[in-house]
Amino acid sequence: MTAPGVDEDVRPKRVAVERRLHPVTPFRRAWAPVAVVVGWAAHDPNQAQEQLTRLTTTALLIVLAVVVSAASLYGFLSWWFTHFAVTDSELRIRTGLLFRRTAHIRLQRLQAVDITQPLLARIAGVAKLRLDVVGAAKKDELAFLGESEARALRAELLARAAGFAPETAHEVGEAPARELLRVPPRELAVALILTGATWGALAAALVVPPFLWLATHSVWTVLATGVPLLGAAGASSAGRFVGEYDWTVGESPDGLRIDHGLLDRTHETVPPGRVQTVRIVEPLLWRRRGWVRVELDVAGSANSVLVPVAPRAVAEAVIARVLPGAEVPATAALSRPPRRAGRCLPLWWRGYGIAVTDTVFVARHGLLRRSVALVPHAKVQSVRLTQGPWKRLWRLADVHVDTGAGKTVTARLRDAQEAADLLRGQAERSRTGRRDARSDQWMA
């Protein structure tokens, strides 16, 4: 793909210049030989201890020097034999000391280009470039680059994926971003405290140990069970707080940019037009405050969270940037299953509902933890109707909508005739939506 006005046939081919990673990279890769030694010692600790006791101080120092030298040499050689280059149509990565591997990443198939900075990388001023590619099960990465070099390379790859000419792509620079949302740390902390999973783990840590004490009268059994449960209750919330700290969503020509992280800083991109499903999650304890969580399904990408917590109106404004023209239906606008659905699923049938608009298929489920999924018609890959014997008895059926991210959104417990009409209507809306869908190209 080329920028407007550029003739690809007469344009001179650019010579690809191979580059190496940042010089700090050998320190990261030098751990491999050390890990082999540690793995051998952990596999047979008794023999390892016997071997160490037989060594004199001089022999121990020699072994240590050999291990350090081997680790340093391995790190240096692996860095020396790793190159990357940006050509007219692809990013080429050559790696391997003994077994060579060359990855050819077509720029037109890039889903996202993310920058991650673990804590030590932030201290050293380097960053890791991670590449999401259509159809690839595993992400390729360049670790590590200088922070400024990583941002410049990311901007160049996005510009090339958008169709800019190779000779001008590196001059485009990083597209400006306009901040849409920033989650305050206090709001995030309160939201995590009010999450049902946190309270469930805490309840298990307080309830299970007394039962174990009554059953075994063993202090060690109680401690061995209660301490991990209590730690899991705190670790789950603390881990999410650290990972989602200072969550910022910005809008730029290359998509929505997401920056987050307290220790490890991550800069992600949600590509425009490639979001398959948007899911609005509303835990029970958040409803009084009017908070919601927004999750995503993006084909070929690991990006799964758009907004960790925000007022509903703010979250819907961000969703409108992801799905232009789509509106989130009010709860009252959702069509519930018929009352006879209670024969198949008592009480919980009230948590289901659907709505179909001009742009999206909407399905809701859950009473305590509500979840509303929005699927753009253009992203529907297939539609299926299922009906078991018990549902046939009560003239009910489920309609499954499959998306390009390999996920399924289901309208459950619908009237059988309504489900058949929904199946035919959604198939037609999907064909029309794909025909009229906007381009998935960056900056188009």
Image (tube, rainbow, N blue to C red):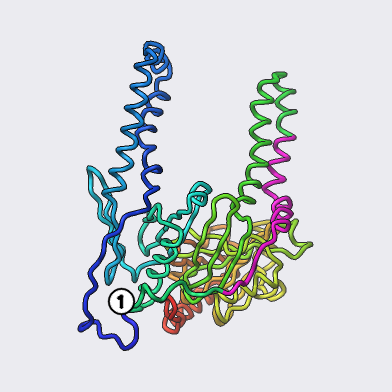
Residue furthest right in the image: 288
Residue 286 left/right relative to 307: right
Please count the marks in the image.
Answer: 1
Q: Quadrant of residue 173?
A: bottom left
Q: Percent from the top left, x then y, of residue 62?
A: 33, 21
Q: Which residues are magenta?
A: 178-206
Camera-nearest residue between 46 and 290: 46
Q: Is residue 314 above or below residue 215?
A: below
Q: Position of residue 193 (x, y in %)?
A: 73, 50
Q: Which residue is mark 1?
A: 167
Q: Residue at x 42, y 57 (%)?
A: 146
Which is more toward the observer, 411 or 256? Answer: 256
Which residue type does callout 1 highlight? Glu
Q: Name the side, left or right, on which 305 lies relative to 72.
A: right
Question: Magenta span: helix, strand or loop, mainly?
Answer: helix
Q: Quadrant of the C terminus?
A: bottom left
The reply, left or right, for residue 289 in relation to residue 337 is: right
Q: Secondary structure at mark 1?
A: helix
Q: Does residue 179 show up magenta in the picture?
A: yes
Residue at point 47% right, 59% down? Answer: 115
Q: Quadrant of residue 130?
A: bottom left
Q: Is residue 318 above or below residue 247?
A: below
Depth check: 183 or 220 in front?
Answer: 183
Q: Is residue 267 visible?
A: yes
Q: Is residue 347 visible?
A: no
Location of the N terminus by quadrant is bottom left
Where is residue 135? Give x, y as percent: 35, 62
Residue at the image point whose x is 34% and y is 71% from the top:
108
Residue 185, located in which quarter of the rendered image?
Answer: bottom right
Question: In x, y percent, where is residue 191?
Answer: 71, 55
Tell me what residue is drawn at x 26 percent, y 47 percent. 96
